[in-house]
């Protein structure tokens, strides 16, 4: 796996920043080191002493872009969300996700939309209905993989999920034609219909569809990448696969009917699985960067981040930091054994799901999907790697040759 320097290098290559080292203030792209230890950063060493790199860029408003390689600054940004920092993403990204989304809203509106989304993806609904749904989907996908000589894991997982978008749109139309869904479990369309039928709805129908799109966009790539990364790590680490399989076999053996559905208690008992998931997310750095802008002048460690500056947070600075994680490039789920799991999926040492007010709303859902997929996989199947499986951070996680496997039923 590549390290945070690689991310920095790729970023510099793309902006041309490193090559044009013209002095600050002369316009165009150029890079200036503003960290504590210029030499360390130049030599490409990683770790707690890594400096922040400040790049003056061609962003429209000509404010600085600070690439933060400092774990403390990363954490501080999340803690000070909507006080000293505010969400900001480049225009190209905002065009994809739509101007009117959870990402662009602030304050009470943001909180309101988050709460709507959490009615579907929060722990209560995960326990009540999503657990079953997720299990059915995982079982059906794996069954459909059986007859095929080679499966490209990420592609297969994400194409399956794309059908969900189509289905949700159809469902919204159907529910509009025949309102008053009487099902026992709530679904997101119920939540949205309720919102749209309010006397003073907080969103238009288009905004509601945009939100559905954003949720699917945010979940397709990320979850598919995460599951592919876990499978790759398991393939290369048979001792991890063995302990994981033992955990799931044990859960299955304790049931009266081994084929009955996974219960919430069983899911919560999957400790080693949870460590495998955290470890894979730590190494994979699926969301390689996050952006914010400073809403005030901020003084930190002898530096000033001027109001209006854009800040690029790189979670790998923490995740691949040897001071925080011993042998950071080694896939070692046992390292989590004596660690308190990050509350709500985030801590100052673990930011795969971001942190603070903007912590990923799908974090619990993503972990549930991964754990249930692994349960269905290791209790019923084994697999053989056919091709690919190389992971590169460039700067996001990529599988240049994909990861192709063949699936077999367990004897
Ligand atoms: C392994 C899978 C996933 C990873 C690594 C991941 C990562 C992240 C990260 C890092 C953020 C914070 C972005 C920021 O602070 O700028 C985020 C936010 C978000 N994620 Fe995820 N995500 C995953 C799965 C999902 C899923 C399954 C969904 C949908 C159900 C989802 C929906 C969202 C949404 C809506 C936000 C914006 C939250 C807000 O602004 O309040 N994510 N995600």
Image (tube, helix red, strand yellow):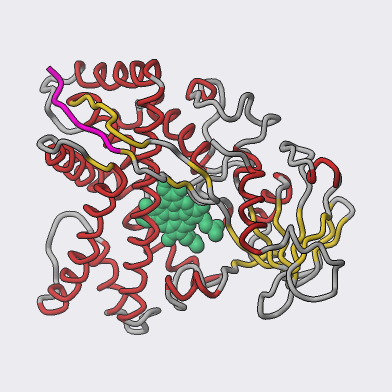
Residue, far right: 302
Identify the image quadrant of residue 140.
Answer: top left
Left or right: 26 in relation to 149: right
Q: Quadrant location of residue 165?
A: bottom left
Residue furthest out toward the front: 19
Q: How many marks?
A: 0
- Taking the image as shown, residue 288 lies to the left or right of residue 160, namely right
Is residue 406 on the magenta stretch? yes
Q: Which residue is drawn at 14% across and 71% down?
A: 180
Where residue 42 sits: x, y (%)?
A: 79, 46
Viewer-nearest residue: 377 or 234: 234
- Tell me which secondary structure the magenta stretch mostly adopts: strand
Quadrant of ligand 1 in image: bottom left
Q: Which residue is drawn at 52% across and 71% down?
A: 108
Q: Residue 167: image x %, image y %?
A: 17, 64
| Residue segment shown in magenta | 404-411
Q: Can residue 363 be seen in this view?
A: no
Q: Pick whichever, 261 or 392, lies toward us.
A: 392
* Quadrant the C terminus occupies: top left
Q: Is residue 198 visible?
A: yes
Is 230 placed above or below 166 here?
above
Question: Which residue is rendered at x = 60% and y = 69% of the image?
Answer: 88
Q: Is residue 287 covered in magenta? A: no
Q: Going by the image, does 283 lie left or right of 142?
A: right
Q: Residue at x 49, y 69 (%)?
A: 93
**Going by the image, does 7 lie left or right of 54?**
left
Looking at the image, residue 346 lies above or below residue 262: below
Residue 262 in the image: x percent, y percent? 22, 32
């Amino acid at each position: 796996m590549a390290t945070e320097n690689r991310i920095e290098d790729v970023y510099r290559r793309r902006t041309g920043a490193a090559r044009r080292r013209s002095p600050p203030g002369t316009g165009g792209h150029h890079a200036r080191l503003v960290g504590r230890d210029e030499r360390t950063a130049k030599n490409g060493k990683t770790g707690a002493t890594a400096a922040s790199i400040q790049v003056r860029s061609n962003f429209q408003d000509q404010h600085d872009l600070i690439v933060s390689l400092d774990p403390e600054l990363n954490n501080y940004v999340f803690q000070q969300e909507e006080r000293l920092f505010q969400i900001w993403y480049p225009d190209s990204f905002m065009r994809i996700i739509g101007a009117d989304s959870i990402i662009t809203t602030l304050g009470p509106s943001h909180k309101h939309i988050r709460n709507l989304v959490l009615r579907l993806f929060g722990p209560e609904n995960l326990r009540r209905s999503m657990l079953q749904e997720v299990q059915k989907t995982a079982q059906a996908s794996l069954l459909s993989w059986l007859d095929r000589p080679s499966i490209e894991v990420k592609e297969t997982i994400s194409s399956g999920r794309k059908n969900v978008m189509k289905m949700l749109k159809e469902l919204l139309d159907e529910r509009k034609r025949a309102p008053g869904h009487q099902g026992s479990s709530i679904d997101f369309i119920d939540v949205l219909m309720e919102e749209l039928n309010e006397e003073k709805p907080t969103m238009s129908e288009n905004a509601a569809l945009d939100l559905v799109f954003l949720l699917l966009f945010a979940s397709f790539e990320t979850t598919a990448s995460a599951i592919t990364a876990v499978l790759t790590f398991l393939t290369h680490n048979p001792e991890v696969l063995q302990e994981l399989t033992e955990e799931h076999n044990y859960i299955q053996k304790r049931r009266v009917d081994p084929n009955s559905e996974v219960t919430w208690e069983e899911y919560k008992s999957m400790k080693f699985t949870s460590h495998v998931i955290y470890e894979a997310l730590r190494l994979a750095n699926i969301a390689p960067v996050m952006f914010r802008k400073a809403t005030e002048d901020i003084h930190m460690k002898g530096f000033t981040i001027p109001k209006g500056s854009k800040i690029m947070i790189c979670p790998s600075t923490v995740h691949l930091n040897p001071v925080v994680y011993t042998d950071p490039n080694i896939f070692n789920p046992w390292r989590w054994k004596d660690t308190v799991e990050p509350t709500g999926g985030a801590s100052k040492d673990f930011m795969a799901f971001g942190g603070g007010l903007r912590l990923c709303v799908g974090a619990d859902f993503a972990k549930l999907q991964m754990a249930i997929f692994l349960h269905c996989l290791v209790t019923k199947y084994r697999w053989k790697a056919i091709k690919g499986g190389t992971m590169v951070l460039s700067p996001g996680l990529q599988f240049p040759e994909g990861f192709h496997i063949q699936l077999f039923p367990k004897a």
